[in-house]
Amino acid sequence: MILVSGASGTIGRYVVSHLRAKGEKFKALVRDEAKGRALECDFVVGDFDQPESIAHAMRGVTRFFLNSNVTDRVVQQQNTAIDLAALAGVERVVKLSSPGAGPDAPIPPARWHGEIEAHLRASGIGWVILQPTVFMQNLFHNADTLSAQRKIFGSYRDGKIGFIDAYDIGACAAAALTGAEHVGKSFILTGREPIDYDEVARKMTAKLGEPVTYVDMPVEHFVANAVARGLPPKMAEFFGKMMTMLASGSAARRTDAVRELTGREPRTFEAFLDDNIHALFTNTYSSPK
C-alpha cells in the first residue's frame, strides 16, 4: 500500500493520477475530507501537526510519498512523519525536496529540505529524493496580471530556468514509489529546455495570438509592491531572494532525470501552454484529478 501525502495539491494530484493509471494500490492523505472525496480514490484524513493522525494513516503502508506545505514548521512535521513511517515498518519514502537543499542553502526552504533529507537518509528506511526545479504551474501566480494586462512582472533578469511540468514530477514520483531500482538515489528534475522569462512571454504570445510582455524590475521594487498588495513582508522577502537566485542562472541546468525515471522525455513548455493557455489568461486554473 502506498500513502500519498499532499495528495490534493498540484503535485500530489498528479501522483494520484499516475498511480491510478498504473493500477497501484494507494490511499491519499488529506487534511480536508471534502478534498479527499474529490480525488475519487481511497483516502485518510490526517494533519502533520497531529502526529497521532499520521500514525493512523501509516497503518498497512509500505511506501510513502512525503510532501507538505513548506512553512517554518516543516522540519519538525516531516521528520516526525519519517519517524512514524519507520515505526510502522514503511520500506520506502519518496521525498519531494528542492534543488540545492542543504545546510548552506541561500533560502530557508532549501535549508529546511536539507535537514529533512539528512534525517531521512539516517532513518534506516529506503529513500528516493526528488528535487524538481521551478514548476510550470507556478506561472499561475501571474494569472491576475496576465488576464488583465497580458504582462508578467518579476526580477528574474535574463536568468534561464529549466521549468518542469508538475505532470512530469508526478510521473517521476510514481516511478520512484513503484520501481525498486531507484532506491538510494537523488534526482534533480528539470524540463527539456531552460528558458528565460522573455522567452516565456514570446511563447505565450505565439500560443495566445496576442502580445504578452515580461516586465523586469529591481528586486527591491518587486518586494515593496508585493507588500503594498498585501503579501506578508517575510513572504515577499522570500520571493525576492528566490528571484535573485533564479536571476543568477542557478536553475538553468537540464538533467536526464525525467527520462531515467519514466523512460520518456519531459513535456515541453509548448505542451504545457497547449493545455493551460486559456486558464492562464482567464485565471480559471484548477488542478487535475
Image: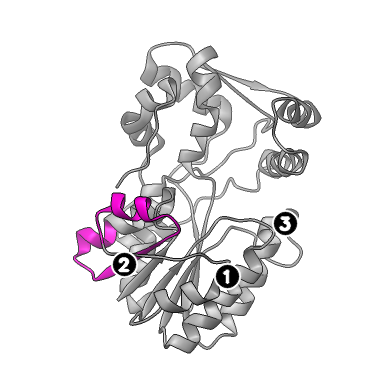
Q: CA distance from mark 3 to mark 1?
A: 15 Å
Estimate how packed mark 2 is, as few (under 14), some (14 to 19) or many (20 or more) residues with alpha carbons within 10 Å. Answer: many
In this rendering, would 115 be left or right of 95? right
Q: Position of residue 46 (x, y in %)?
A: 45, 66
- Residue at 77% across, 38% down: 233
Secondary structure under the numbered disc 2 in the rendered image:
strand
- State the image quarter where residue 56 is shown: bottom left
Pick whichever, 34 or 208, lies toward us: 34
The amino acid marked with disc number 1 is: Gln
**Mark closer to the observer (3, 2):** 2
Q: CA distance from mark 2 to mark 1?
A: 18 Å
Q: Position of residue 190 (x, y in %)?
A: 48, 51
Which image quarter holds the N terminus? Answer: bottom left
- Residue at 58% across, 58% down: 98
Which residues lie in the magenta part? 18-41
Would you name the residue on which mark 1 appears? 78
Q: Position of residue 20 (x, y in %)?
A: 23, 60
- Residue at 34% across, 55% down: 36
Residue 108, numbered label? 3
Q: Earlier in the sequence, mark 3 or mark 1?
A: 1
**Mark closer to the observer (3, 1):** 1
- Residue at 44% across, 25% down: 283
Q: Earlier in the sequence, mark 3 or mark 2?
A: 2
Would you name the residue on which mark 2 appears? 27
Secondary structure under the numbered disc 3 in the rendered image:
helix
Residue 182, numbered label? none
The answer to whether 241 is drawn above or below residue 4 in the figure is above
Pick whichever, 58 or 151, lies toward us: 58
Pick whichever, 4 or 43, lies toward us: 43
In this rendering, would 26 be left or right of 286? left
Q: Position of residue 156 (x, y in %)?
A: 67, 33
Secondary structure under the numbered disc 1 in the rendered image:
helix
